[in-house]
Amino acid sequence: MGNKPFSLSVKALVRDANGCCLLLRRSAASEGNAGKWDLPGGKLDPGESVDRALCREVAEETGLAVSVERVVGAAQSELPDRIIAYLVMEARAGSGPVRLSAEHDDFTWADVRELARMDLAPPFLAFARTYGRAREE
């Protein structure tokens, strides 16, 4: 990894009233992980708090208002120019329909036990296995 700078991205594991998790499929035009299932979220704006950034990103990508509840994991991916550190936070979905941004072309509400079997973006595979096992116990 060397001397690459780290950047922070927040991701939401959005749960509905039934405990299912919202996954978004990255569009074919996506620069990274096209066609893979992903968690809503993204980069923090300068000076923005983690929870505010997460709520903003989820609203931009899904049209949903969420309430952030707790940190549930972390992940990272290496790009040619930097390393992205992901902070994964559990959030509860408010009411209303999902309205996707252009970044994504589909969504699904997946049972926690199904997360590890989904075609997830690579940085989140280990997280999905750990999170799913912890919820089965």
Image (tube, rainbow, N blue to C red):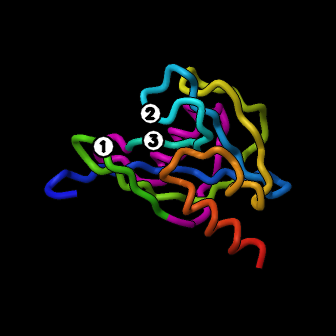
Please tell me which residue is depicted at 63% across the width and 34% down the height of the picture. Answer: 25
In this view of the protein, which residue sits in the foreground, 112 or 14?
Answer: 112
| Alpha carbons under labels 1 and 3: distance apart | 15 Å
Dividing the image into 4 quarters, which one contains the C terminus? bottom right
Mark number, residue 32 = 2
Dividing the image into 4 quarters, which one contains the N terminus? bottom left
**Disc 3 marks which residue?**
42
- Which residue is at the far right? 18
Determine the secondary structure under disc 2: loop
User: Which comes before the other along the chain, label 3 or label 2?
Assistant: 2
In magenta segment, residue 121: no
Determine the secondary structure under disc 3: strand
Residue type at numbered disc 2: Gly
Mark number, residue 41 = none
Residue type at numbered disc 3: Gly
What range is drawn magenta here? 44-73
Q: Count residues near mark 3 (Cα–Cα under 10 Å), then give few for <14, some for 14-19, many for 20+.
A: many
| Alpha carbons under labels 2 and 1: distance apart | 10 Å
Q: Count residues near mark 1 (Cα–Cα under 10 Å), then give few for <14, some for 14-19, many for 20+.
A: few
- Which residue is at the far left? 3
- Report how many numbered discs are placed on residues in the image: 3
Where residue 132 sits, quadrant-wise, is bottom right
Q: Return the x and y of residue 131 as percentages of the image width and height.
A: 64, 67
Contact flag, marks 2 and 1 (Cβ < 8 Å): no
Residue type at numbered disc 1: Leu
In magenta segment, residue 62: yes
Please tell me which residue is depicted at 67% across the width and 50% down the height of the picture. Answer: 14
Left or right: residue 80 versus residue 137 is left
